[in-house]
Image (cartoon, helix red, strand yellow):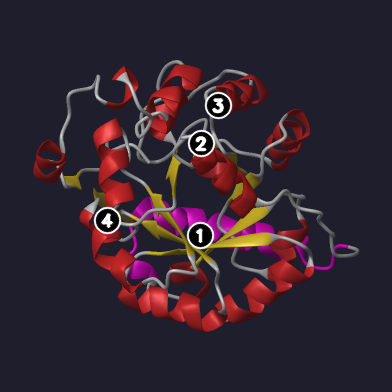
Amino acid sequence: MDDPDELAPAVRSILSGARERASAARGADGDISVSPRDLSAAFERADAEDRVPLIAEVKPTSPTTEGSREDDPVALAEGMVAGGAAALSVLTEPGHFGGSVDTLERVRDAVDVPVLRKDFVVDEAQLDAVESDVVLLIARFVGDDLPRLLEAARDRGFQVLVEVHDREELERALDAGATTIGVNNRDLAELVVDLGTFESVAPHVPDEVTLIAESGIGSPADVRRMRAAGADALLVGSAIMDGDVAANTRELVRTEAGGDEATADGDDAAAADDDATETTETPT
């Protein structure tokens, strides 16, 4: 795990809270067992239907956005699925993202697509907090524990998304046996987003690994850019949560479809290149 002094204050606070929750969870009775909905199959269905495979995120708030969304999370999730999302991500981190395991349970009961639990898992005990189809392990935060936590998650039936930010973390994820990898365009040391991060890491990911682009994707131009760089799927939060979630989801998943939807925005790759490096206001 990185030196905490190298991380943004908000991230240090999030990790501190995660460790406290992990400590409280230790000693609970029994491991959960999950029968997951197949994430890869969901992506394949989206591709077959000319939809960009997209994980839409139910995120009430975050340290990098202003304000919060008070709508019923279930209604938001249903809107995202209606808009064409192949899967959902639900925040369960309570202190900085307004998430909860109860919200995830309600959402997963209401939809039929795979649901990713988005949280800062740093201890095996946290895996037993709630059933989901996919769990997130962030390579930077779990360090040498990645192989053990990956195995523990799979033993419970979870599919696992391992998040990396650079080549070194990618190699650790591959060595640990990760088969689904997300490249986070956001540098968690300073919370700055650069879409070039994905473009620099993606060429080194084996073809058999499912590759997901995360953070900073806010427009059809961004979608095209990440897909051209090799993204099998995208994870989008703030850009979907800001406004009509069904319409926002639909705009992004139809980016590669034929007809006016694919070109109506008028953006192009050159314009996206000009905006490659974003600040903390960039959508996640």
Measured Cα–Cα span from mark 2 to mark 3 = 7 Å
Going by the numbered disc 3, the residue's amino acid type is Met
Q: Amino acid at mark 4?
A: Glu
Q: CA distance from mark 4 to mark 3?
A: 30 Å
The residue at which mark 2 appears reads as: 56
Label 1, secondary structure: give it: helix
Relative to 177, say whether 132 is above or below.
above
Res. 15 mark = 1
Number of marks in the rendered image? 4
Is disc 3 placed on a helix, strand or loop? helix
Task: Identify the disc placed on residue 178.
Answer: none
Please tell me how crowded label 3 is: few (under 14), some (14-19), or many (20+) other residues with Cα within 10 Å.
many
Residue 54 in picture, x, y percent from top left: 48, 40
Is label 2 in contact with label 3 (beta carbons under 8 Å)? yes
Residue 110, percent from left and from top: 75, 28
Residue at the spot of label 4:
190
Which mark is first along the chain, 3 or 2? Answer: 2
The numbered mark, 4 or 1, whose residue comes first in the sequence reads: 1
Q: Earlier in the sequence, mark 3 or mark 1?
A: 1
- Of the image marks 4 and 2, the number of the one nearer the N terminus: 2
Cα distance, mark 4 to mark 2? 24 Å
For label 3, the residue is: 80
Residue 275, image quadrant: top left
Tag 2: amino acid: Ala
Image location (x, y in percent) of residue 239: 37, 30
Mark 4 vs mark 2: in front: 2
Main SS, magenta residues: helix
Taking the magenta stretch, the answer to whether it contains residue 20 is: yes
Q: Secondary structure at mark 4?
A: loop
Quadrant assignment for the C terminus: top left
Alpha carbons under labels 3 and 1: distance apart: 29 Å
The boundaries of the magenta stretch are 4-28
